[in-house]
Amino acid sequence: MSNSHQLTILENALQAVLPLTDKELPQSLSTELLNHQRVGPAKLNFLCRSKLKGAIFCDEMGLGKTIQFITACEISKDEIPGFCDLIVTSKTLINNVACDIREHFRNVSKASLMK
């Protein structure tokens, strides 16, 4: 199977991923997610369960990437043995990320901030 054919299959599979239901959301989440914020974590978790070993998660500023990513991480840590997550951000945004985690999640596992 060619790489382009495999990519087409992956693209079609990602388009079919449905938003997370209330039942699928992590209990640590303390914020109501918008529909697009339920699709992002669902797609990230789909990719985590596939044979792919990474993803780049990006969109316009202010659409809730941090909340979506931490939601996906909270789901994956329970489903995938040895799961590890990493947020790479500029020094100027480290405090924003930490504030988002504290504001939108309860009892999130330890996070290390490296400056």
Image (cartoon, rainbow, N blue to C red):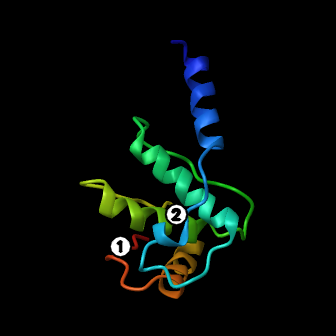
Left or right of residue 48, residue 35 in this image: right
Indicate whether 43 appears above or below 7: below
**SS of the residue under disc 1:** loop
Image x and y of residue 9, in percent = 58, 27
Most foreground residue, 20 or 43? 20
Q: Which residue is mark 2?
A: 69
Residue under pointer 1: 112
Residue at left 68%, top 66%?
35
For the residue pair 115 and 94, the one nearer the viewer reads as 94
Query: Which image quarter is the C terminus in?
Result: bottom left
Q: Residues within 10 Å of mark 2 (few under 14, many from 20)?
A: many
Three-letter amino acid code at the position of disc 2: Phe
Q: Earlier in the sequence, mark 1 or mark 2?
A: 2
Amino acid type indicated by mark 1: Ser
Q: Residues within 10 Å of mark 1 (few under 14, many from 20)?
A: few
Residue 76 falls in image quadrant? bottom left
Left or right, residue 49 beside residue 37? left
- Could you say which is closer to the camera, residue 92 or residue 84? 84
Q: Element type at marker 2?
A: helix
Q: Residue at x 40, y 44 (%)?
A: 49
Instruction: State which quadrant residue 8 falls in.
Output: top right
Q: Does 93 sit left or right of 109 as displayed? A: right
